[in-house]
Amino acid sequence: MKKQWLSIALGIVTATGGFLDAGTIATAGEAGAKFGLGLIWVILVATIAIILLVEMIGRFTAVSKKTYAEAIREDFGFRFYLLPLSSELIAESLMLAAELGGISIALSLFTGISWHIFFPFVALFIWILAWRAPFDLIENGPALLGLVTLSFLAGIIALGGIPAPLIPTLWHPSFQQGTVAEYLYLSAAIFGSTISPYLLYFYSSGAREEHWSGASLLLNRVTAIVGMGFGSMGSISLVVLAAIVLQPLNISSNTLGELGLVMAKPFGIVGSFLFALVLFATCTGAALEVVLAISYNIAQGFGWEWGENKKPIEAARFNLVMTIFLLIAVVIGLIGIDPLQLALFASTVIALFLPISLSPFLILMNDPEYLGNKTNGRFTNIAMIGILVLAFLVAIISLPLAIITGGG
Amino acid sequence: MIDPHDEVFSIRDILDSQLLTSDGRRIGRVADISAEEHTDGSLKLTHLVVGPQALAGRVNSHLRSLFLFFLRDRFEHSIPISEVTRFGPTLHLRGKAEDYAVGQSERWIAKHILRWIPGNGR
């Protein structure tokens, strides 16, 4: 039982990695710099959605002993399974490149050496972790480091709290630097970066790696709320910091490095290092989650051996997919696009594909063959329909707005 | 759940099911089935088929021909239905993983590719 409660770390790492990642940091920083606190409501709505989705997928896996990818293939058939799989492959290869770039920029902030030089070594570091580290280490390492995200809150306090003139931007966004199209585009990107489907595949597989059962449902609920709540708090804190520090300077945070200013103002050089540490921890957690989520997805969908607690030769195809996927991300990263821009673009692509990734939920979560008497109730079904409607809206507006705004 | 002795069963229940060997290894999923026609016109399921051509055929029949042209049945494998000891979303097989050609790519990758990578667990 004690071990079960200790595994709440799964929620924290899923939050720091899945909620807070290069995409969230990029969108939150840009949101605060351009629109003050005007996009916090989007983060709050997206947080409620991701809490509900994580709770559902955790419940589904704990009760049915099936992961999300397995259930999609078995219930919807191979043809349908290809849709979420291909959308994941496209969106997450971009996001993985952005995460690797985020880690490289963190190291660059520490050392002053160009992030491009670090990039291949960072990919190797992530590959070594994913190749041999047991699931516990992947879960707990970035989780502990991710606690430095609390320094964003400390930064706000050190700057004297939220200035009174900023508060009305909560409901009346400031358009000093951004346009309405950019506002809508960033809203879509925030949804894409917050409700990342890779998070659901990873969480579902993690629940199997940890042998969750019907007795884990309370733990699952607490994990979903605490984990995602923690991630959301970090994200909102960054919006506030960017609104306090960057907006008055007319800096629209075009690179992840520029975003470091939000912590340099309250804490000087220490703040810059703290920001770099947050970037390092969250992007490392996210990079591991993304690369594993894709490997889990493919191995489970095709019925191969999978698992981080197995030796690589015991799950050869799973580990080969992981290696190839990392190589693809390295190639994308070596093109040299700034990770912040790449993360924004990847978030938009994720937003575009959200309905495909989320639509199986409604059917699976109401199937008593999988869930017995733990199927969705009326409230969760209405909430799920609401999330799907939102996902469709976001998907419809994301691409045209990305073109209009030139990607933020 | 399907009983192998049931006369009526749904092909949909078998397609895409996980194949699990007696030593607890996941070797693949059912991509297609093959059946033989009896003199009375009834069809009897004989084999479970796994492979890229069968999967391509699930997407589009032209794709199956295209895959056949390039792959020449090289990666297509089948398992007699008599090998299944338990039916359901997971099909439990009588033999061990090494007894089946299905999933041999797992062993091939381990032997020929992963062996060169340090820390492979060998």
Image (cartoon, rainbow, N blue to C red):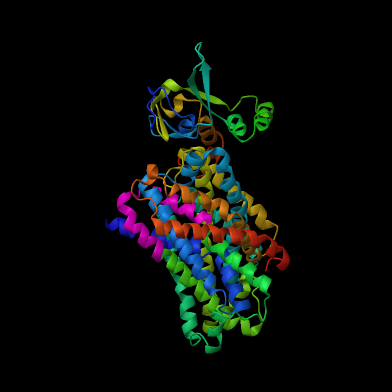
Q: Please tell me which residue is depicted at 43% across the width and 68% down the height of the picture.
A: A229
Residue A371, compared with residue B88, is above or below; it is below
- The mark total stands at 0
Residue furthest left as drawn: A1
In which quadrant will I find the N terminus of chain A? Answer: bottom left
Please state if A333 lies on the left or on the right of A70 as rendered.
right
Taking depth in this image into account, of A5 and A347 the one nearest to the observer is: A347
Task: From the top left corner, tell me how far across and down residue A170 is, in percent.
Answer: 54, 80
- Seen from the viewer's position, the closer of residues B64 and A15 is B64
Q: Is residue A25 visible?
A: yes
* Residue A374 sits above or below residue A168 on the image: above
| Residue A119, picture quadrant | bottom right
Can you give x and y, in whole percent of width and height, for residue A209 in the image? 40, 48
The reply to whether residue A65 is visible in this rendering is no
Q: Residue at x 58, y 28 (%)?
A: B75
Which quarter of the rendering shows the C terminus of chain A?
bottom right
State the image coordinates of residue B70 (x, y, percent, origin top left): 68, 29
Quarter of the image where one finds residue A27: bottom right
Span highlighted in magenta in the image: A197-226
Q: Residue at x 37, y 47 (%)?
A: A371
**Left or right side of A277 for B69:** right
Judging depth in this view, the residue of A109 and A192 nearest the camera is: A192
Q: Is residue A295 magenta?
A: no
Secondary structure character of the magenta stretch overall: helix
Indicate the position of residue A342 as horizontal and vertical percent values: 65, 62
Please check the rendered image and state whether residue A217 is part of the magenta-colored stretch, yes or no. yes
